[in-house]
Amino acid sequence: MPMTCTICRHKEREEIEQDLIKGVSLRNIAKRYNVGYSAVNRHKEHIPAHLAQAAKGQEKERARDLLQEVEELQQTTYNLLKKAEAAGDLRTALYGASQARGNMELLCKMVAYLREQQLDELSRKRQQDFQEVSPFIDDPVFMTALQRAIDETEAYYEQTGQLPDPGRS
């Protein structure tokens, strides 16, 4: 039986994840929350999955907040990197570039995972819709209307990144 991540079960998981996103050292996080360094290190990979879960249902706002925090952290990192470069502090600038790369990697993982979840949802909806209309497949008028609706849905999704509201006109 696989073991469950101790950080995922931790009562202060949200705070731990926020510290990870802010770039607090793994050692400091482990000490602050009385958990193992390696557990914190392993948990870093769970953050994109937690964001996808947060994007569903009541935790949608939390997913947006976490993405915004990472974006703000990235902007702060860039600003500090520019200051270090301007001051000729190459060591700090190099460290800043490394941090910026790590931030960007996390942000890309988060966005890719959330995008994948949206595409999975779109695919599930398409399968459900197809099963509902399968008795009408041989009707050319129905099939033309269906194709137009599919094209409009795809165009809306490409423009907005969201599925259309079924109640919209």
Image (tube, rainbow, N blue to C red):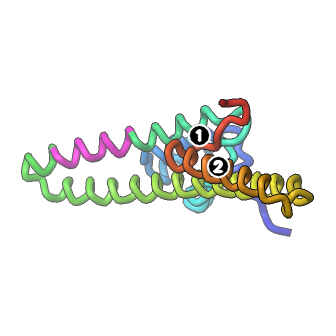
**Residue range of the region highlighted in magenta in the rendering:** 72-82
Q: Residue drawn 58% across and 60% down? A: 45
- Asked if the residue at tag 1 contacts the one at tag 2, i.e. Cβ–Cβ closer than 8 Å, the answer is yes
Query: On the rendered structure, is 96 left or right of 8?
Result: left
- Mark 2: amino acid: Ala
Vertical placement of residue 98 versus 145, above or below? below
Q: Is residue 4 magenta?
A: no
Q: Which residue is mark 2?
A: 52
Q: Quadrant of the C terminus?
A: top right
Who's the residue at 72% across and 36% down the image? 166
Q: Secondary structure at mark 1?
A: helix
Do we see residue 37 in this rendering? no
Can you say whether 37 is above or below 1 in the image?
A: above
Taking depth in this image into account, of 140 and 22 the one nearest to the observer is 140
| In-image side of 75 versus 40 (left or right) | left
Q: Secondary structure at mark 2?
A: helix
* Residue type, label 1: Ala
Other residues around mark 2 within 10 Å, as few (<14) / some (14–19) / many (≥20): many
Q: Is residue 1 visible?
A: yes
Spot occupied by residue 134 in the image (x, y as percentages of width and height): 88, 60
In this orientation, which residue lies closer to the viewer: 76 or 5? 76
Q: Residue furthest right?
A: 135
**In the image, is 135 to the left or to the right of 100?**
right
Question: Could you say where residue 6 lies in the image, as x and y percent from the top left?
Answer: 71, 53
Name the foreground residue: 81 vs 49. Answer: 49
N-terminal-most mark, 2 or 1:
2
Name the residue nearer the viewer: 4 or 68: 68
- Residue lying at 55% horizontally and 60% vertically, measured from the top left: 41
Q: Which mark is residue 16?
A: none
